[in-house]
Amino acid sequence: MSHDTPPHMPAMPPPPPEPAAKKSRTNAIIISSAAAVIAAIVATGIVVTQSGDDDSEPTTAAGPSLYGMEGTAAAVAESSPETEMEPTYSDLDADDFTMELRTTSRQCFGSAGCNVTVEPELTYVGVFNGIDPDVVYEITYEIQGDESGPVIQTAELSNETRLNYRPSMISTASSGTKVSVEITDVATQGG
């Protein structure tokens, strides 16, 4: 006769696993670390904003460094409204700009050459914030490649970025004639 015996059952149920306590401790560490990082970012942002709102020229006094916060209180104290100065702009010359020509139309007549319309594309290559927004700059340039000789034009730069000019129509000796431009002078009006 065969007799089946039931499996052995423990007298007490097993205790609940303890990883839940470790998980909540890990979450607390992560949350407190995130709060510390956020507080540091906010504090740094306030210092940078306060020292960045100063429109005056940078001083050589110790201020926030790339590697730490040395001199932060001194830098914030120096940015009072009484010490703000008007920005100063240096005189600009031809070396502060580069210019290229954009061809907007071309009509060629075989061996008789071409009629070409070009417009200047001006780029400022000088120091940052060097263009006075209250001044109109007259930029004189010379276009080479016209069969009658150089063509001299003037464009006006105003409001730092607005360039007013008249397109130039030139006649080249052939379709292979290279057209180039050179800035010859920069003068100012107003300001």
Image (cartoon, rainbow, N blue to C red):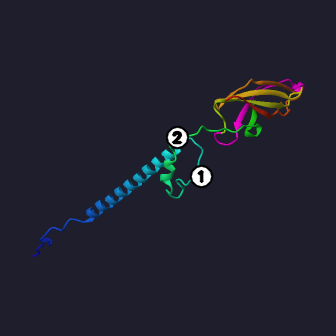
Q: Is residue 126 part of the magenta span, yes or no?
A: yes
The answer to which of 171 and 93 lies nearer the viewer is: 93
- The residue at the point 70 percent across, 41 percent down is 126
Q: Position of residue 40 (x, y in %)?
A: 43, 53
Crowdedness near tag 1: few (<14), some (14–19) or many (≥20) residues, C-alpha within 10 Å: few
Residue 189, placed above or below residue 89: above
**Residues in magenta, as a range:** 104-129
Q: Amino acid at mark 2?
A: Glu
What residue does disc 1 label?
Answer: 60
Q: Depth-wise, is mark 1 or mark 2 nearer the camera?
A: 2
The residue at which mark 2 appears reads as 82
Q: Which secondary structure class fits the magenta region best?
A: strand
Q: Does 84 sit left or right of 170 as displayed?
A: left
**What's the CA distance linking mark 1 and mark 2?**
18 Å
Image-based side of 75 in relation to 15, left or right: right
Q: Quadrant of residue 132?
A: top right
Residue 89 placement, left or right of 56: right
Q: Is residue 143 visible?
A: yes
Looking at marks 1 and 2 on the same chain, the residue that comes earlier in the sequence is marked by 1
